[in-house]
Image (tube, helix red, strand yellow):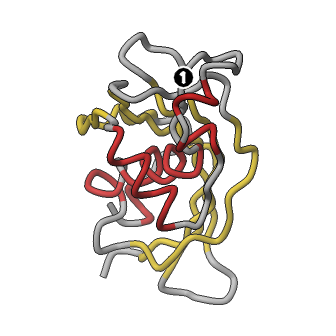
Amino acid sequence: MYYEQFVVGDTIEHPLRRTITEADNTWFSALTMNPQPLHMDEESSRDTNFGTRIVNSIFTLGLVCGMPVYDMTLGTTLGNLGFTEISFPAPVFHGDTLRSRTTVTEKRESRSNPAAGIVTARHEGLNQRDEIVCSCVRVFLMKKQP
C-alpha cells in the first residue's frame, strides 16, 4: 500500500497466521541474549502463575508487527518512526496460533519528505481463542504513489 491508500478508521484483518513452537521461543530468546527462565526453563516455570514457559514478549511483538507487512508495507515503507502503547494483556504459550489485525488511526503528510506520508496504526495480535495477546501503536513512514 502507498500512503494515499491508507484510510483512517479502516481495520485490516491479516490472513497470515503463525503457530508458535518451542523452537521459535528458544531460538529467539537465545539470539537476543535473554536467558530468562520464564522462557527457557520448564522446571522453574512450573512454579510461576503460568505453570509453564511463556513465549518471549518481544518475539510476540515482532510477529504481530511482521504479519501485516505483506498486506500493507512490503516495498512501500521507508521505515518505522516509533512504537508506543505496547501491552501484552495475555500470555502466549508454545502451540498458540496468532493472527494480526491493524486499525489505521492517523495519517499526515511528511513535513521533511514530500514523497512520503506518516501513518499511525494500532496492531493487535490475537490467539486462536480470539484473546488479544499483544497490542501496540506504530508510526511509520510510507512512500506516496509515484
* The N terminus - image quarter: bottom left
Label 1 packing within 10 angstroms: few (<14), some (14-19), many (20+): some
Looking at the rendered structure, the kind of residue marked 1 is Thr
Q: Give x and y (percent) for residue 40.
A: 53, 44
Q: Give x and y (percent) for residue 111.
A: 69, 82
Residue 112 sits above or below residue 28 on the image: below
Residue at the front extreme, as displayed: 43
The answer to whether residue 4 is left or right of residue 145 is right
The answer to whether residue 102 is left or right of residue 16 is right
Disc 1 designates what residue? 52
Determine the residue positioned at 67% across, 24% down: 89
* The C terminus - image quarter: bottom left
- In which image quadrant can residue 52 be found? top right
Residue at the right extreme, as displayed: 85
Q: Identify which residue, 36 or 16, lies in the foreground.
A: 36
Secondary structure beneath label 1: loop
Q: Identify which residue, 11 or 57, lies in the foreground.
A: 57
Determine the residue positioned at 38% across, 56% down: 5
Determine the residue positioned at 74% across, 52% down: 84
Residue at the top extreme, as displayed: 129
Determine the residue positioned at 43% across, 46% down: 25
Residue 117 sits above or below residue 115 on the image: above
Q: Give x and y (percent) for residue 14.
A: 31, 37
Report how many numbered discs are placed on residues in the image.
1
Q: Identify which residue, 96 or 2, lies in the foreground.
A: 96
Residue 71 sits above or below residue 16 on the image: below
The answer to whether residue 89 is left or right of residue 79 is right
Q: Give x and y (percent) for residue 90.
A: 61, 22
Q: Identify which residue, 76 or 130, lies in the foreground.
A: 130
The answer to whether residue 90 is left or right of residue 95 is right
